[in-house]
Image (cartoon, rainbow, N blue to C red):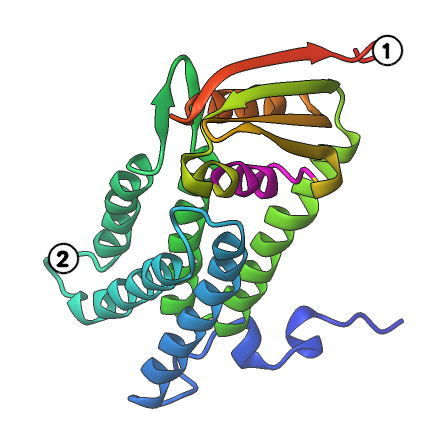
Amino acid sequence: MVVLSIPALFPDWIVSGLRGTVPSPWLEILLVLAAVVSGSLIGAERERHEKPAGLRTLILVCLGSAIFTMVSYAFTSTTGDSGRVAAQIVTGIGFLGAGAILHDRGSVSGMTTAATIWATAAVGIVAGVGHLVGAIALSLLMRAILTVVQNWEVRHLGGMREAVIEMLCDPDHGKTRIRIDRLREVFHVTAQQMQIESLDDAHIRARIHLRLPRKYLHELLNSLADLPAVKEIHASKVDGSP
C-alpha cells in the first residue's frame, strides 16, 4: 500500500512557500504581484456591487498587508520579534473596517464590507509570508463566499417575505429614478418587479412587488425611506407570505 504525503503530491514551493527557494528581489516581486492579484479578485466583486470598499481599496489593503509582512522579516533580531509587525496589521485594519460600519435608526450596515477588509488583510499576510498559491486560493474562496453564499442566502434561507412597496416621490429632475434603480440593483430586485408612473411635474409614484428575506426587506425599506425625494412610503405584506 502506497501512502502519498502532501509534499509528494505538490512541489515544495507550494507546500512550504517561496521563501528559501526564490532569491531576492524576485521573491518580493512575485509576492507583491500575488497580493495585487488576490486583492483584485476580491475587490472586483465588491466594486461590481458598488460597495464602499471596492477594487482599489482592497488591492491596497492586500498589498499593504503583504508589504508590512515582508518588511517584518528584516526586523528579526535578538531584541525584537518580527511577528509584532504582522500583529499590528490586525489592529490597524480594525480601524479601517470600523469606518465602513454605519449605525442608523437601530440598524447596522457595512458589516460584510468590514469583514471583507479584515479578511483581505489576512490574505495579504499570507502572500507576504511567501505562500503565493495559498493567497490566491484564499481570495478565490472569499469571492465565492461573497457571491455564491449570498445568492443561496437570498433564495433558500427562511424568513422570506413577499411585499408591495408604494412610494410618492419628487422626481428631482430624474435623480430619484437613478437612486431607486441603484437600490434595486443592490437588493437584486428585477426591473420587471418595479413600476414608475408620472403624476405631474412634481410627483411620481413607484410601485415595487418583491420577495426578499425579512432582513433584506427591512434594509431596503430603511434605504428607500432615507431618500430625500421620498414623500410617502407604504409597505404591505402579500397574503400567504410568512
Q: Is residue 231 above or below residue 177?
A: above
**Disc 2 designates what residue?**
80
Look at the image and give the residue range highlighted in magenta. Answer: 179-189
Residue drawn at (33%, 58%), measured in percent from left and top? 61
Tell whether position 152 is magenta. no
Quadrant of the image occupied by residue 23: bottom left
Q: Quadrant of the N terminus?
A: bottom right
Residue 129, image x, y percentages: 38, 67
**Disc 1 designates what residue?**
240
Residue 214 in sight from this viewpoint: no
Q: Secondary structure at mark 1?
A: loop
Dominant SS of magenta comes to helix
Residue drawn at (56%, 72%), measured in percent from left and top? 15
Q: Distance between the Cα atoms at labels 2 and 1?
A: 65 Å
- Badge 1 density bin: few <14, some 14–19, many ≥20, Cα 10 Å: few
Looking at the image, do the residues carrying marks 2 and 1 touch, with CB atoms under 8 Å apart?
no
Residue drawn at (47%, 33%), measured in percent from left and top? 171
Is 131 on the left-hand or right-hand side of 197? left
Residue 72, image x, y percentages: 22, 64
Residue 85, image x, y percentages: 22, 55
Instruction: Residue type at mark 2: give it.
Output: Gly
- Badge 2 density bin: few <14, some 14–19, many ≥20, Cα 10 Å: few
